Amino acid sequence: MNTNELITERRNQEWRETLRKSRSAKERSAIERVKMPELDPSYRITSLTEEVNTGLTEEQALLEATRCLDCAKPTCMEGCPVGIHIPSFVKEIERGRFAEAATILRETSSLPAVCGRVCPQERQCESKCIYHSMKKEPVAIGYLERFAADWERVNGTMKVPELQPRNGKKVAVVGSGPAGLSFAGDMAKLGYEVVVFEALHEIGGVLKYGIPEYRLPNEVVDAEIELLHRMGVSFETNTIVGATLSYDDIHDMGFSGLFVGSGAGLPNFMGIKGENLVGVMSSNEYLTRVNLMNAGAEDSETPVFRGRSVAVIGGGNTAMDSVRTAKRLGAERAMIVYRRSEEEMPARIEEIAHAKEEGVEFLTLHNPVEYLSNERGRVRSMLLQKMELGEPDASGRRKPVAIEGAIEEVPVDVVIVSIGVSPNPLVPNAFKGLNVSSKGTIVVNENNATDLPDVYAGGDIVRGGATVILAMGDGRKAASSMHEYLSRLS
């Protein structure tokens, strides 16, 4: 049964029809969208680990689910990269069957509790909600996804999804980030023996080292990984494919296929004077040290310099994570320096709002041109070029243009550069025969297949930097494609 047939069958169920008729569309649309409960800003900036958004209550979830009109053609699904059956799980919540809602989520998503927290639903599923045509706020799909997945975890009802019998074939996965975990989950469902190779000592990739716990708690990620364990997925840490293991080694170990989801962990810098000063670092280094190496603790053996005046260069989610982390580490002044206006910022609206609530300053239409040092070689200030917006560039955003002579010096003792990342070069360099772009990304076709017939790839190693949910979508597509390829070889 294909996706459309399944949606139709579920929608035509007797209970669903009765539920639809229990309230008119007018009554449902009159309900105001729920507001996510969150910790007070003055309190939350004291903790690196306590989650800011506290989740919906059962009463809030039931009411929000009631807003869904259960459209005959659910356009919300068009915006979901992993194809979650959105109205079906929402309607299960409306009738109070929370475990069933979580089961539906897991049919297509290996990480629903993660996606419910960090996915940009406002640009994806919620952006397609029919309520927009009615000039109303969309159904809070992300909040409801988080609620169902959290309810399942807290109440101990997480269960292994239906698995096909083992088919005797092994597949390997490079990287345990969202692309790799999504691929692993789907291949395990299809009956494959799956082994995930992770270069670091912790499973989870960017979900662990890149996203702070106050936004995505480790216990949430660990619970999703534990379910993959129960599905038969194996994990090997401290193993670097491309160095510890070669392409030939993978084959010698009996693997029939390989999925590369090694991410984009190489930070970009601006190439301006003073970037090599002590106190200037990438967001990758900063967040990895704090999130994965406990560098923010008072008794850390490898502490990160906290800084009283911290500037983060960039306007994406990683920049927001970095500046909000700096605030939690005691920065008296924490600044976002961004060369465009706030309207052009790629970060989620919620993340920008949370940063402002926590006292972060926004120096928009400013661009660093040099960092100045003290007598010990540590950064002491930055020279900022004031900008104005010109004509739109290739991305559709108005291009920032320097205002001649408008430069100001701002004191700073820590600078965190968050202007994007480049792909991890290990696998592209080590696997002969891969087609690699000028930017270092692995080139794949529409099925996420590479030029090597048994190697597929997805996530940031292909996209060069994207969202968790897009990486998961790549993993799902690659799993389906590899399964089709390996089945033809049988």
Image (spheres, rainbow, N blue to C red):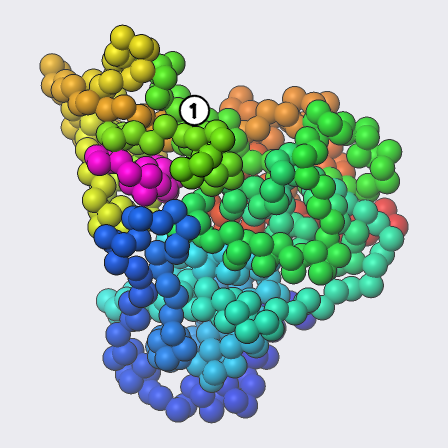
- The kind of secondary structure element at disc 1 is loop
Residue at screen point 71% across, 46% down: 235
Q: Residue at x 42, y 39 (%)?
A: 297
Residue at the spot x=60%, y=42% of the render?
202
Residue 148 in view here: yes
Residue nearest the observer in this picture, 171 or 19: 171
Horizontal and vertical percent for residue 204?
58, 46
**Residue 144 location (% of width, % of height):** 43, 69
Left or right: 45 in relation to 20: left
How far from the left and from the top, in percent, is residue 102? Answer: 55, 70
Q: Name the residue carrying label 1.
A: 268
Nearer to the camera, 202 or 11: 202
Front residue of 294/443: it is 294
* Residue segment shown in magenta: 317-338
| Residue 82 visible within the image | no
The answer to which quarter of the image holds residue 139 is: bottom left
**Picture coordinates of residue 95 (x, y %)?**
47, 84
**What's the amino acid at mark 1?**
Asn
Give residue 164's quadrant in the image. Answer: bottom right
